[in-house]
Image (tube, rainbow, N blue to C red):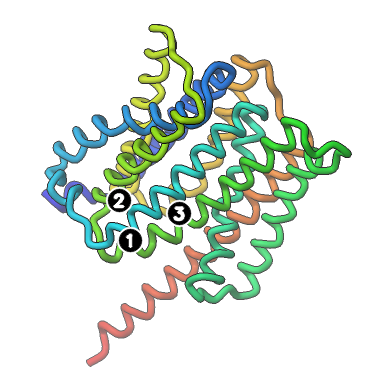
């Protein structure tokens, strides 16, 4: 049974990953559509709360519900929840102020910041190739946000939105570092479950800063947003059961195509030349990192093979 759940089925893996990316982009579009009527904290609450039943049903189907309740580092899960909720709230704020393709493009910088944070916090060595990849990625980020930061009035909504999305990418970088440490002691089911619960509770506290009573139609959309987020989270997790991370990583950038299509059809938005150029550089930097990780993986595999065959 365990063997079948981790089989190599690349077509299924890619289908699951692309489906998840499309759903995440559709969820972001719903957030953007509702942002004029609801504060970000309230939307984070619905996104998190209604993802919980989807996640619980998924854990039951996999027979992992018990593991989802057991934690060895409760404070680790709390801080993972704080960081993840912060990232989600900043992203939702950015969606209310910026075009959907722009938010998507800036979000591609997360792996670059993760690499930097891994070197600073975990002491991971960054060699010349990775340093070059980070430099290319940061240049792309600068090109994307400079039109927003280069204006005389830094208090404009677009500038605030760009800073929020950039802050969200840094927060997600911290999340990735935190998850690397949590998976060493706790089951992934617990990490997924307790994040949703923590995000729900933390975002509920924003009620003191003002919430809006939704109409019936708005309530249905808010619930749908949470359900879509939960399903997308499961799909992207499941995709890695059938394909290697290095194979699936490049497909992340198809979300830009989804964002451009949905942004144009729904919000009459198109990415600027600066966004396309900056996104291309960030993607190029990430591609170098992915290639380097693949090369190192092959080298480690050869080293293990030689060690195993020693008499």
Disc 2, SS: helix
Numbered badge on residue 182: 1
N-term mark: 1 or 3: 3
Q: Is residue 57 placed above or below 292 in the rendered structure?
A: above
Q: Position of residue 34 (x, y in %)?
A: 53, 18
- Measured Cα–Cα span from mark 1 to mark 3: 10 Å
Q: CA distance from mark 3 to mark 2?
A: 11 Å
**Foreground residue among 9 and 137:** 137
Q: Residues within 10 Å of mark 2 (few under 14, many from 20)?
A: many
Secondary structure of residue under mark 1: helix
Residue 270 falls in which quadrant of the image? top right
Instruction: Classify mark 3: helix, strand or loop.
Output: helix
Position of residue 124 in the picture relative to residue 71 (left or right): right
Residue at left offset 27%, top offset 61%: 73
Measured Cα–Cα span from mark 1 to mark 2: 8 Å
Q: Residue at x 31, y 37 (%)?
A: 234
Q: Residues within 10 Å of mark 3 (few under 14, many from 20)?
A: many
Pick the quarter of the image with the C terminus: bottom left
Where in the figure is residue 123, as x and y percent of width and height?
51, 76
* Side of 110 relative to 219 (left or right): right
Q: Could you say where residue 267 lies in the image, as x and y percent from the top left?
A: 63, 17
> Residue beneath label 3, please?
175
Q: Does label 1 or label 2 sit earlier along the sequence? A: 1
Q: Residue at x 72, y 45 (%)?
A: 278
Contact between labelled residues 2 and 1, with CB atoms less than 8 Å apart: yes
Number of marks drawn: 3
Query: Quick one: label 1, few (<14), some, or many (20+) residues within 10 Å?
Result: many
Residue most toward the right?
152
User: Residue at position x 63%, y 39% from top?
Assistant: 105
Give the x, y percent position of residue 109: 61, 50
Q: Are marks 1 and 3 in contact (CB under 8 Å)?
A: no
Q: Which residue is mark 2?
A: 191
């Amino acid at each position: 049974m365990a063997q079948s759940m981790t089989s190599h089925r690349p077509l299924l893996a890619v289908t699951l990953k692309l489906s998840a990316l499309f759903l995440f982009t559709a969820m972001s579009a719903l957030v953007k559509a509702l942002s004029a009527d609801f504060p970000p904290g309230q939307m984070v609450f619905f996104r998190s709360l209604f993802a919980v039943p989807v996640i619980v049903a998924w854990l039951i189907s996999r027979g992992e519900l018990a593991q989802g309740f057991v934690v060895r580092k409760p404070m680790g899960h709390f801080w993972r929840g704080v960081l993840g909720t912060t990232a989600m709230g900043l992203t939702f704020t950015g969606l209310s102020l910026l075009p959907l393709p722009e938010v998507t493009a800036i979000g591609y910088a997360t792996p670059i910041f993760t690499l930097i944070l891994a070197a600073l916090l975990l002491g991971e060595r960054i060699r010349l190739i990775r340093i070059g990849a980070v430099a290319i990625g940061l240049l792309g980020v600068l090109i994307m946000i400079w039109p927003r930061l280069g204006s005389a009035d830094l208090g404009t909504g677009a500038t605030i939105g760009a800073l929020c999305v950039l802050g969200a990418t840094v927060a997600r970088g911290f999340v990735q570092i935190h998850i690397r440490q949590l998976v060493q002691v706790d089951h992934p089911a617990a990490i997924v479950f307790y994040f949703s619960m923590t995000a729900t509770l933390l975002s509920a506290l924003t009620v003191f800063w003002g919430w809006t009573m939704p109409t019936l139609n708005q309530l249905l959309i808010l619930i749908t947003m949470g359900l879509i987020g939960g399903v997308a989270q499961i799909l992207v997790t499941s995709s890695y059961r059938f394909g290697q991370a290095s194979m699936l990583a490049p497909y992340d950038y198809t979300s830009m195509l989804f964002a451009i299509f949905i942004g144009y059809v729904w919000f009459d938005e198109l990415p600027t030349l600066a966004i396309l150029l900056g996104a291309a550089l960030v993607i190029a930097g990430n591609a170098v990192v992915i290639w380097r990780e693949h090369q190192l993986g092959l080298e480690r595999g050869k080293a293990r093979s030689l060690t195993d065959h020693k008499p």
